[in-house]
Image (spheres, rainbow, N blue to C red):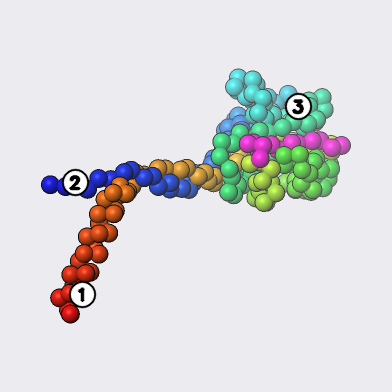
């Protein structure tokens, strides 16, 4: 009994893997005292500091949350919020909960996405004693810069503004995609088997022509 001998071949298959992104810098705890989102904060004082020990020791921007004021002298006039990325962003939204923002009255501070100035992005007049959540969609250049550096960095700079503000949290939401390659074994006929198969087919064709003659 003859055996049909096969060799193994391989087929590569690319699979696109999508995943959601939801990264917080700081925690959504109402400025450390349970103030509702888009709520009334009351009058913060320059001695207000509700940071946790984790926030106090942070270096990714969480250290600038839950106290007043995050961008006014004598505290740092500039700081970075850093979101580390492991996969490429397809789309993303940056969100921030901020209190006492009075840009038109006291001047705008500047905001940069990965070193690129986003002109007038924080030109809001929410009013003293009020908190508000503001969201910003990342454009194609923002996504490209973040993906290239494997992190999305938001830089806040007082830029001469006299506005004293507090931040509750910073958040990045969106979707990432990555390509994974899988291999699958395929049965490939051994060359001698292919020759035998070809001869068999040829014999059948010859026999058929003789029977028709």
Q: Position of residue 81 (x, y in %)?
A: 68, 33
In the figure, residue 154 lies in which quadrant? Answer: top right
Give the residue at mark 2. Answer: 3
Circle 1/circle 2 CB separation < 8 Å: no
- Whether residue 35 sits left or right of residue 72 in the image: it is left
Query: Which residue is more in the foreground, 53 or 207?
Result: 207
Give me the C-alpha separation between circle 2 and circle 3. Answer: 87 Å
Label 2, secondary structure: give it: loop
Give the residue at mark 3. Answer: 46
Label 1, secondary structure: give it: helix
Q: Does 39 appear in magenta?
A: no
Give the residue at mark 1. Answer: 209
Q: Which residue is at a point 76% across and 39% down the rendered structure image?
A: 115
Of the image marks 2 and 3, the number of the one nearer the N terminus: 2
Residue 34 visible (yes or no): no
Give me the C-alpha separation between circle 1 and circle 3. Answer: 102 Å
Camera-side mark, 1 or 2: 1
Q: Position of residue 180 (x, y in %)?
A: 47, 42
Of the image marks 1 and 3, the number of the one nearer the N terminus: 3
Q: Quadrant of the C terminus?
A: bottom left
């Amino acid at each position: 009994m003859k055996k049909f001998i096969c060799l193994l071949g391989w087929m590569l298959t690319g699979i696109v893997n999508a995943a959601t992104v939801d990264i917080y810098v700081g925690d959504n705890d109402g400025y450390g005292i349970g103030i509702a989102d888009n709520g009334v904060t009351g009058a913060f004082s320059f001695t207000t500091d509700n940071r946790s020990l984790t926030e106090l020791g942070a270096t990714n921007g969480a250290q600038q949350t839950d106290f007043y004021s995050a961008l006014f002298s004598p505290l740092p006039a500039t700081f970075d919020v850093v979101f580390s990325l492991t996969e490429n962003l397809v789309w993303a939204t940056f969100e921030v909960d901020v209190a006492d923002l009075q840009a038109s009255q006291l001047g705008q501070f500047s905001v940069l996405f990965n070193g690129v100035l986003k002109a007038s992005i924080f030109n809001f007049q929410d009013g003293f004693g009020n908190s508000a959540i503001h969201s910003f969609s990342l454009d194609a250049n923002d996504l490209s810069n973040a993906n290239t550096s494997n992190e999305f960095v938001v830089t806040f700079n007082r830029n001469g503004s006299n506005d004293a503000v507090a931040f509750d949290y910073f958040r990045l939401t969106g979707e990432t995609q990555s390509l994974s390659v899988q291999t699958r074994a395929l049965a490939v006929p051994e060359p001698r088997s292919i020759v035998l198969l070809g001869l068999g087919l040829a014999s059948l064709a010859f026999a058929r022509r003789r029977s028709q003659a």
